[in-house]
Image (tube, rainbow, N blue to C red):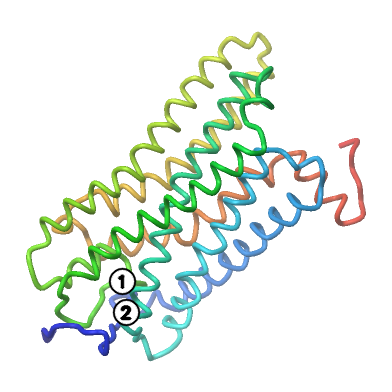
Amino acid sequence: MGSFNTSFADGFILVGFLDWPQLELFLFVFISIFYSLTLLGNTVIIILSRLDPRLHTPMYFFLSHLSFLDLCFTTSTVPQLLINLRGRDRTISYGGCAAQLYIFLALVSTECVLLGVMAFDRYAAVCRPLHYTTIVHPQLCHALAISSWVGGFINSLIQTGLMMAMPLCGHLLNHFFCEMPAFLKLACEDTGATEAKMFVARAIILVFPAALILGSYARIAQAVLKVKSMAGRRKAFGTCGSHLVVVSLFYGSGIYTYLQPTSSYSDSGGKFVALFYTILSPILNPLIYSLRNKDVKRALWKVLGRDRDSE
Protein backbone atom coordinates (compact mmCIF):
# COMPACT_ATOMS: atom_id res chain seq x y z
CA MET A 1 0.00 0.00 0.00
CA GLY A 2 1.58 3.26 -1.09
CA SER A 3 1.88 6.05 1.44
CA PHE A 4 1.02 9.66 0.84
CA ASN A 5 -0.30 12.51 2.87
CA THR A 6 -4.05 12.53 2.33
CA SER A 7 -5.49 15.95 1.51
CA PHE A 8 -9.02 17.18 0.90
CA ALA A 9 -8.55 16.47 -2.81
CA ASP A 10 -7.87 12.79 -2.15
CA GLY A 11 -10.42 10.13 -1.38
CA PHE A 12 -10.41 6.70 0.20
CA ILE A 13 -11.15 3.21 -1.02
CA LEU A 14 -13.42 1.28 1.35
CA VAL A 15 -12.05 -2.26 1.41
CA GLY A 16 -15.24 -3.62 2.96
CA PHE A 17 -15.55 -7.40 2.60
CA LEU A 18 -13.18 -7.87 -0.34
CA ASP A 19 -11.29 -10.38 1.82
CA TRP A 20 -14.40 -12.61 1.73
CA PRO A 21 -15.75 -12.31 -1.84
CA GLN A 22 -17.79 -15.49 -1.34
CA LEU A 23 -19.78 -13.71 1.40
CA GLU A 24 -20.65 -10.59 -0.55
CA LEU A 25 -23.85 -11.86 -2.20
CA PHE A 26 -25.06 -13.39 1.07
CA LEU A 27 -24.29 -10.16 2.94
CA PHE A 28 -26.08 -8.09 0.30
CA VAL A 29 -29.28 -10.16 0.62
CA PHE A 30 -29.05 -10.41 4.43
CA ILE A 31 -28.39 -6.69 4.92
CA SER A 32 -31.06 -5.65 2.40
CA ILE A 33 -33.71 -7.66 4.27
CA PHE A 34 -32.69 -6.40 7.69
CA TYR A 35 -32.38 -2.80 6.51
CA SER A 36 -35.90 -2.94 5.05
CA LEU A 37 -37.26 -4.39 8.31
CA THR A 38 -35.42 -1.72 10.30
CA LEU A 39 -36.96 1.05 8.22
CA LEU A 40 -40.42 -0.51 8.56
CA GLY A 41 -40.26 -1.28 12.29
CA ASN A 42 -38.87 2.07 13.40
CA THR A 43 -41.16 4.06 11.09
CA VAL A 44 -44.18 2.22 12.50
CA ILE A 45 -43.12 3.08 16.07
CA ILE A 46 -42.74 6.78 15.22
CA ILE A 47 -46.12 6.94 13.43
CA LEU A 48 -47.99 5.09 16.17
CA SER A 49 -46.41 7.24 18.90
CA ARG A 50 -47.74 10.32 17.10
CA LEU A 51 -51.20 9.04 16.14
CA ASP A 52 -52.40 7.18 19.25
CA PRO A 53 -53.16 9.38 22.31
CA ARG A 54 -52.56 6.39 24.60
CA LEU A 55 -48.93 6.42 23.52
CA HIS A 56 -48.43 10.08 24.40
CA THR A 57 -46.37 9.14 27.45
CA PRO A 58 -42.71 9.76 28.36
CA MET A 59 -41.78 6.14 27.56
CA TYR A 60 -43.07 6.34 23.98
CA PHE A 61 -41.76 9.89 23.56
CA PHE A 62 -38.24 8.56 24.19
CA LEU A 63 -38.92 5.44 22.10
CA SER A 64 -39.89 7.57 19.12
CA HIS A 65 -36.60 9.45 19.50
CA LEU A 66 -34.75 6.13 19.68
CA SER A 67 -36.53 4.90 16.55
CA PHE A 68 -35.68 8.08 14.66
CA LEU A 69 -32.07 7.74 15.83
CA ASP A 70 -31.92 4.16 14.59
CA LEU A 71 -33.35 5.18 11.21
CA CYS A 72 -30.64 7.84 10.81
CA PHE A 73 -27.99 5.59 12.35
CA THR A 74 -28.44 2.68 9.97
CA THR A 75 -29.06 4.92 6.94
CA SER A 76 -25.74 6.71 7.50
CA THR A 77 -23.84 3.54 6.53
CA VAL A 78 -26.02 0.78 5.06
CA PRO A 79 -27.02 2.22 1.65
CA GLN A 80 -23.38 2.84 0.78
CA LEU A 81 -22.46 -0.64 1.98
CA LEU A 82 -25.12 -2.19 -0.27
CA ILE A 83 -23.82 -0.21 -3.27
CA ASN A 84 -20.24 -1.28 -2.52
CA LEU A 85 -21.22 -4.94 -2.16
CA ARG A 86 -22.66 -5.04 -5.68
CA GLY A 87 -20.56 -2.38 -7.44
CA ARG A 88 -16.94 -1.91 -8.42
CA ASP A 89 -16.44 1.70 -7.36
CA ARG A 90 -15.73 1.67 -3.62
CA THR A 91 -14.29 5.17 -3.35
CA ILE A 92 -15.48 7.89 -1.02
CA SER A 93 -14.22 11.48 -1.00
CA TYR A 94 -12.27 12.89 1.93
CA GLY A 95 -15.11 15.30 2.71
CA GLY A 96 -17.71 12.55 2.41
CA CYS A 97 -15.71 10.32 4.73
CA ALA A 98 -15.30 13.09 7.31
CA ALA A 99 -19.03 13.84 7.15
CA GLN A 100 -19.93 10.17 7.55
CA LEU A 101 -17.53 9.81 10.48
CA TYR A 102 -19.01 12.88 12.20
CA ILE A 103 -22.65 11.92 11.63
CA PHE A 104 -22.13 8.28 12.64
CA LEU A 105 -20.26 9.19 15.84
CA ALA A 106 -22.88 11.81 16.69
CA LEU A 107 -25.72 9.31 16.33
CA VAL A 108 -23.88 6.60 18.31
CA SER A 109 -23.11 9.09 21.08
CA THR A 110 -26.70 10.35 21.15
CA GLU A 111 -28.05 6.80 21.40
CA CYS A 112 -25.71 6.05 24.33
CA VAL A 113 -27.08 9.03 26.26
CA LEU A 114 -30.69 8.37 25.24
CA LEU A 115 -30.54 4.77 26.48
CA GLY A 116 -29.40 6.13 29.84
CA VAL A 117 -32.30 8.59 29.87
CA MET A 118 -34.73 5.76 29.08
CA ALA A 119 -33.36 3.70 31.97
CA PHE A 120 -34.00 6.67 34.28
CA ASP A 121 -37.57 6.88 32.95
CA ARG A 122 -38.15 3.17 33.71
CA TYR A 123 -36.64 3.65 37.19
CA ALA A 124 -39.04 6.51 37.93
CA ALA A 125 -42.02 4.49 36.61
CA VAL A 126 -41.25 1.37 38.65
CA CYS A 127 -39.67 2.79 41.80
CA ARG A 128 -41.57 6.08 42.11
CA PRO A 129 -44.96 5.27 40.56
CA LEU A 130 -46.94 7.75 42.70
CA HIS A 131 -44.64 10.63 41.76
CA TYR A 132 -43.88 9.52 38.20
CA THR A 133 -45.92 12.20 36.42
CA THR A 134 -44.41 14.97 38.54
CA ILE A 135 -40.83 13.64 38.15
CA VAL A 136 -40.89 12.86 34.42
CA HIS A 137 -42.99 15.81 33.24
CA PRO A 138 -43.14 16.94 29.58
CA GLN A 139 -40.66 19.80 30.06
CA LEU A 140 -38.10 17.42 31.54
CA CYS A 141 -38.67 14.91 28.72
CA HIS A 142 -37.98 17.54 26.08
CA ALA A 143 -34.95 18.84 27.99
CA LEU A 144 -33.48 15.32 28.33
CA ALA A 145 -34.10 14.52 24.65
CA ILE A 146 -32.50 17.78 23.50
CA SER A 147 -29.57 17.23 25.88
CA SER A 148 -29.02 13.74 24.42
CA TRP A 149 -28.85 15.09 20.87
CA VAL A 150 -26.70 18.11 21.74
CA GLY A 151 -24.34 16.03 23.90
CA GLY A 152 -23.96 13.43 21.15
CA PHE A 153 -23.14 15.96 18.45
CA ILE A 154 -20.70 17.87 20.67
CA ASN A 155 -18.91 14.63 21.60
CA SER A 156 -18.66 13.71 17.93
CA LEU A 157 -17.36 17.19 17.04
CA ILE A 158 -14.53 16.75 19.56
CA GLN A 159 -13.53 13.30 18.32
CA THR A 160 -13.88 14.08 14.63
CA GLY A 161 -11.94 17.30 15.06
CA LEU A 162 -9.08 15.44 16.75
CA MET A 163 -9.10 12.80 14.01
CA MET A 164 -9.19 15.25 11.10
CA ALA A 165 -6.31 17.26 12.58
CA MET A 166 -3.99 14.26 12.18
CA PRO A 167 -1.98 13.72 8.98
CA LEU A 168 -3.18 10.58 7.21
CA CYS A 169 -1.07 8.33 4.99
CA GLY A 170 -2.62 5.91 2.54
CA HIS A 171 -5.95 5.63 0.82
CA LEU A 172 -7.14 2.10 1.68
CA LEU A 173 -9.61 2.21 4.57
CA ASN A 174 -10.00 -1.36 5.82
CA HIS A 175 -13.69 -1.11 6.69
CA PHE A 176 -17.07 -0.83 4.99
CA PHE A 177 -17.59 2.75 6.20
CA CYS A 178 -15.51 5.55 7.72
CA GLU A 179 -15.11 4.11 11.21
CA MET A 180 -12.82 5.77 13.75
CA PRO A 181 -10.49 2.82 14.61
CA ALA A 182 -9.90 2.09 10.91
CA PHE A 183 -9.23 5.80 10.34
CA LEU A 184 -6.67 5.88 13.16
CA LYS A 185 -4.67 3.11 11.48
CA LEU A 186 -4.00 5.49 8.56
CA ALA A 187 -2.33 8.08 10.82
CA CYS A 188 1.21 9.02 9.76
CA GLU A 189 2.31 9.80 13.30
CA ASP A 190 2.04 8.31 16.78
CA THR A 191 -1.62 8.42 17.85
CA GLY A 192 -1.04 7.94 21.57
CA ALA A 193 -1.80 11.51 22.65
CA THR A 194 -4.81 11.83 20.36
CA GLU A 195 -6.18 8.45 21.44
CA ALA A 196 -5.87 9.48 25.09
CA LYS A 197 -8.01 12.57 24.45
CA MET A 198 -10.51 10.53 22.44
CA PHE A 199 -10.63 7.91 25.17
CA VAL A 200 -11.78 10.53 27.67
CA ALA A 201 -14.53 11.73 25.30
CA ARG A 202 -15.61 8.15 24.60
CA ALA A 203 -15.54 7.13 28.26
CA ILE A 204 -17.81 10.05 29.17
CA ILE A 205 -20.37 9.16 26.49
CA LEU A 206 -20.17 5.38 27.09
CA VAL A 207 -19.33 4.78 30.74
CA PHE A 208 -21.53 7.41 32.44
CA PRO A 209 -24.78 6.37 30.70
CA ALA A 210 -23.87 2.69 31.22
CA ALA A 211 -23.41 3.35 34.95
CA LEU A 212 -26.77 5.16 35.05
CA ILE A 213 -28.43 2.21 33.29
CA LEU A 214 -26.91 -0.37 35.65
CA GLY A 215 -27.81 1.72 38.70
CA SER A 216 -31.38 2.25 37.49
CA TYR A 217 -31.98 -1.42 36.77
CA ALA A 218 -30.41 -2.45 40.08
CA ARG A 219 -32.96 -0.26 41.86
CA ILE A 220 -35.73 -1.60 39.62
CA ALA A 221 -34.73 -5.18 40.50
CA GLN A 222 -34.88 -4.32 44.22
CA ALA A 223 -38.34 -2.84 43.79
CA VAL A 224 -39.59 -5.81 41.76
CA LEU A 225 -38.36 -8.30 44.36
CA LYS A 226 -40.67 -6.60 46.87
CA VAL A 227 -43.69 -7.31 44.67
CA LYS A 228 -45.68 -10.18 46.16
CA SER A 229 -47.37 -11.25 42.92
CA MET A 230 -45.27 -13.77 40.97
CA ALA A 231 -47.04 -12.76 37.76
CA GLY A 232 -46.10 -9.13 38.41
CA ARG A 233 -42.50 -10.12 39.07
CA ARG A 234 -42.26 -12.18 35.91
CA LYS A 235 -43.72 -9.38 33.79
CA ALA A 236 -41.37 -6.75 35.25
CA PHE A 237 -38.29 -8.97 35.01
CA GLY A 238 -39.23 -10.02 31.48
CA THR A 239 -39.52 -6.41 30.32
CA CYS A 240 -36.39 -5.21 32.14
CA GLY A 241 -34.46 -8.31 31.06
CA SER A 242 -35.29 -7.67 27.39
CA HIS A 243 -34.24 -4.04 27.70
CA LEU A 244 -30.99 -5.00 29.39
CA VAL A 245 -30.17 -7.52 26.64
CA VAL A 246 -30.49 -4.82 23.97
CA VAL A 247 -28.52 -2.31 26.01
CA SER A 248 -25.79 -4.86 26.81
CA LEU A 249 -25.39 -5.83 23.16
CA PHE A 250 -25.22 -2.19 22.04
CA TYR A 251 -22.81 -1.13 24.78
CA GLY A 252 -20.76 -4.32 24.51
CA SER A 253 -20.10 -3.78 20.81
CA GLY A 254 -19.46 -0.07 21.41
CA ILE A 255 -16.96 -0.74 24.19
CA TYR A 256 -15.20 -3.36 22.04
CA THR A 257 -14.86 -0.88 19.18
CA TYR A 258 -14.13 2.38 20.95
CA LEU A 259 -12.52 1.64 24.31
CA GLN A 260 -9.63 -0.55 23.17
CA PRO A 261 -6.28 0.71 21.84
CA THR A 262 -5.93 0.93 18.06
CA SER A 263 -3.02 -1.52 18.24
CA SER A 264 -5.39 -4.17 19.66
CA TYR A 265 -8.18 -3.48 17.18
CA SER A 266 -8.82 -6.32 14.73
CA ASP A 267 -9.83 -5.13 11.25
CA SER A 268 -11.74 -8.34 10.49
CA GLY A 269 -13.40 -8.59 13.88
CA GLY A 270 -14.20 -4.88 13.83
CA LYS A 271 -16.12 -5.20 10.56
CA PHE A 272 -18.37 -7.98 11.86
CA VAL A 273 -18.92 -6.22 15.19
CA ALA A 274 -19.82 -3.08 13.22
CA LEU A 275 -22.30 -5.14 11.19
CA PHE A 276 -23.97 -6.06 14.46
CA TYR A 277 -24.48 -2.54 15.77
CA THR A 278 -25.31 -0.99 12.38
CA ILE A 279 -27.64 -3.77 11.16
CA LEU A 280 -28.95 -5.88 14.06
CA SER A 281 -29.21 -3.40 16.92
CA PRO A 282 -31.51 -0.95 15.06
CA ILE A 283 -33.98 -3.75 14.28
CA LEU A 284 -33.87 -5.23 17.79
CA ASN A 285 -34.86 -1.95 19.46
CA PRO A 286 -38.41 -1.75 18.04
CA LEU A 287 -38.90 -5.50 18.51
CA ILE A 288 -37.81 -5.55 22.14
CA TYR A 289 -38.99 -2.14 23.34
CA SER A 290 -42.24 -1.69 21.48
CA LEU A 291 -43.69 -4.24 19.10
CA ARG A 292 -44.02 -6.82 21.91
CA ASN A 293 -46.00 -4.30 23.96
CA LYS A 294 -49.80 -4.60 24.14
CA ASP A 295 -50.29 -0.82 23.97
CA VAL A 296 -48.38 -0.71 20.68
CA LYS A 297 -50.29 -3.69 19.30
CA ARG A 298 -53.61 -2.02 20.14
CA ALA A 299 -52.45 1.21 18.49
CA LEU A 300 -51.38 -0.73 15.39
CA TRP A 301 -54.72 -2.53 15.10
CA LYS A 302 -56.52 0.80 15.56
CA VAL A 303 -54.53 2.44 12.75
CA LEU A 304 -55.26 -0.58 10.55
CA GLY A 305 -58.98 -0.15 11.28
CA ARG A 306 -59.26 -3.22 13.49
CA ASP A 307 -59.46 -1.87 17.02
CA ARG A 308 -58.70 -4.60 19.57
CA ASP A 309 -59.16 -2.89 22.90
CA SER A 310 -60.44 -6.10 24.31
CA GLU A 311 -57.19 -7.92 23.54
Vertical arrangement, residue 203 with respect to residue 23, above or below? above
Q: Residue at x 38, y 91 (%)?
A: 88
Determine whether 101 is above or below 10 in the image: above
Q: Quadrant of the N terminus?
A: bottom left
Q: Which quarter shows the C terminus?
A: top right
Q: Type of residue at label 1? A: His
What is the crowding at mark 2: few (fewer than 14 residues within 10 Å), some, or many (at least 20)? many
Residue 65 screen position, x and y as percent: 60, 51
Task: Please give the label number shown on residue 14.
Answer: 2
Image position, residue 199 (x, y; %): 23, 49
The structure residue drawn at horizontal position 33% and vertical position 71%, both measured from the top left corner, is: 178
Q: Element at badge 1? A: loop
Mark 2 or mark 1: whose residue is earlier in sequence: 2
Q: Residues within 10 Å of mark 1 (few under 14, many from 20)?
A: many
Expressed as whole percent of the image width and height from the top left, the position of residue 195 reads 17, 55
Task: Give the number of the disc on residue 175.
Answer: 1
| Residue 234, quarter of the rendered image | top right
Side of 120 where 259 appears, left or right = left
Q: What amino acid is at disc 2?
A: Leu
